[in-house]
Amino acid sequence: MFLSFPYEPRKLKATEGRLRAIMDAARLGLKGDRLAIAAGMMPTEYRQLCQFDPVVEYAELKARTETEMKMSAIVHKAAEEGDVKAAMAVLQNQHEWVAKQQINVDIDQRISINQALEMAQARVALVANEPEDVEFKELPQKQKVA
């Protein structure tokens, strides 16, 4: 089974309907190729339209800004009304608050030279008492079943 997509070159214009479609897609958070497809254009057409007419990029940016303002107002209102998660989100994302991640490790250990010498001698004595003729046996290998 073959699918064919008819291609017919279209004249690109930033019409009111096309700009509205771009803004609607941008309000939903779509970007790039997905925005173009949602707006009823091929990705190459959308890129060309952005190059030829700066109003297209402005429409996308304006829609994103409107949505960001709306969502920001909702989060700020929730924070003002006592929502702790919303307040923390505002502080962390807008005011760069971060949880302190500090670890204090204080080790106060003193080693005397005599104690270090005794420990070293004990390790040497341990190695010296090891038998030198240690036999290593190979583990039996599994036989292949044909």
Image: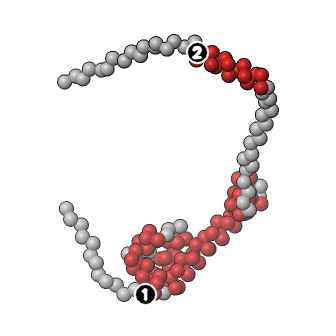
Q: In the drawing, does residue 35 fall left or right of residue 27?
A: left
**What amino acid is labelled 1 in the image?**
Lys
Mark 1 = which residue? 13
Q: How is the image coloured?
A: secondary structure
**What amino acid is labelled 2 in the image?**
Ala
- Quadrant of the rendered image containing residue 68: bottom right
Up/down of 112 relative to 97, above or below = above
Question: Disc number at residue 128?
Answer: 2
Distance of label 2 from label 1 (alpha carbons)? 89 Å
Can you say which quadrant of the picture contains the C terminus? top left
Q: In the drawing, does residue 143 fall left or right of residue 50?
A: left
Camera-nearest residue between 46 and 72: 46
Up/down of 134 relative to 12, above or below = above
* Secondary element at tag 1: loop
Camera-nearest residue between 71 and 50: 50
- Quadrant of the rendered image containing residue 141: top left
Residue 78's x, y, as percent?
72, 59
Looking at the image, is mark 2 or mark 1 nearer the viewer?
Answer: 2
> Residue at (64%, 19%) from the top-left corner?
123
Up/down of 73 relative to 9, above or below = above
